[in-house]
Amino acid sequence: MKVLLVEDSPVVLKVLRYLVSQNDLFIPVLAASFEEAKTCLAEHDDDFFAAIVDLNLPDAENGEIVDLVLDRQIPCIVLTGNFDDELRLKLLNKGVVDYITKDSRYSFNHAMKVLERLEKNNNIKVLVAEDSSTSRLFIKILLQQYQFQVVEAENGQEALAILEQDSSIKMLITDYNMPLINGYDLVRMLRHNERFKDLVIIGLSAEGDSSLSAKFIKSGANDFLKKPFYHEEFHCRVNHNLEAQEMLQTIRDLANIDPLTKLFNRRYLFAEGESSYQKSIASGRILSVIMLDIDYFKKVNDTYGHIIGDALLEEFSACLKLVFPGEMISRFGGEEFCVLLPAENEESVISKINELFEKLKGMQFTECEISITCSGGVACEMQPTLSKAIEIADERLYSAKNTGRNKFVCE
């Protein structure tokens, strides 16, 4: 992603270039004047993810660089040596992402933080529930300035239906006073559903009741904003709540994700997997347990070393994700893996395992181009608990290994 950096001070430009280069996603493109910026934009076909610009340039002292960048619909972060509140509001109303004064090193770090937030927001979908079309459009514009994907709803009932259908929505911004279902009741309904426990919710209201913010937050909202609000206040609240949720997810990942393969770990398998298994028993659906083990993995470590062995485990895990997309795949321990596979019958499970075995035939892993096989054990018949099903699948796995490897046993 190209980032245009426009700054007449060589020292500041050097600092910005260094900071932007620290993120592998970004490629800095430098300009020391308005004319150089025009040339860069022409040469690169406006193919820029964002721009960080100095407001006052020797050949454009009145902020012309901002108009140049915004006219090409490039997110613009302004860096300036002087703080002017009237100018700040004018620029924010124009559509500038942020207005930052160059008064310390933290200013440059903040600019980088905004840039990285823009990149993350590209993949974040936000639902705006607001019955006023004017307010809804205003909020939508603010969110799109920060590169969010925006979905709209005119009332709480429509918002609830959208959330039920689209699990990719990460944030809800809801007004309080809406027809059919108001914002407060909408929050309560969502928080009573386990599925929406991680949905970030920000409440809005123009009403003067001082207790409304507390009611929203006590009912499960993450935050509350009283209308009208400033651009910067809105963006800060949105970003702060998303970062808090991302930090929570990071903590969960540390507890539930295997750091090498990025698959679920054994702890998560027995906790969440057991819950899924019991739900399958209750609904009469088949949830098959597949235990897999890479054949002769110790020989790989002995021959090529543990670094190559680790790389093999990573690549094999990626292969499992391709064959079993969206399923619960866990690293059970060492080179042993467990897959929970919902299936209509035993034949469909066997078909997926055959797909894995066929895929392995044509693959070479790591820079050493290692060919591998694996062995598997499958428990298609439902057991009283997941632990029992894993025990049976594991016994069949070792039967496959003891009778020649590169095969799987179903019974």
Image: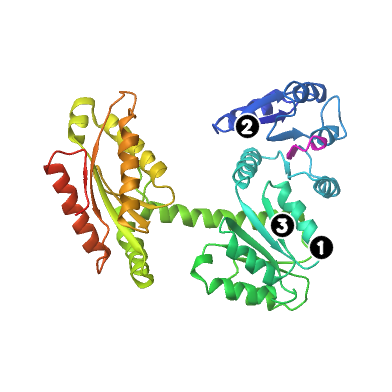
Placement of the N terminus among the 4 image quadrants: top right
Q: State the separation of the CA atoms marked 2 and 3.
A: 28 Å
Q: State the separation of the CA atoms marked 1 and 3.
A: 21 Å
Q: Nearer the viewer, residue 167 or 142?
A: 167
Q: Residue furthest right?
A: 62
Reading the image, the residue beneath label 2 is 1
Mark 1 and mark 2 in contact? Answer it, CB < 8 Å. no
Q: Secondary structure at mark 1?
A: helix
Reading the image, the residue beneath label 3 is 233
Q: State the separation of the CA atoms marked 1 and 2.
A: 34 Å
Residue 25 lies in magenta, yes or no? Answer: no
Reading the image, the residue beneath label 1 is 133
Q: Earlier in the sequence, mark 1 or mark 2?
A: 2
Write down the region rendered in magenta: 70-79
Against 197, residue 140 (above or below) is above
Q: Secondary structure at mark 2?
A: loop
Amino acid type shown at disc 1: Ser
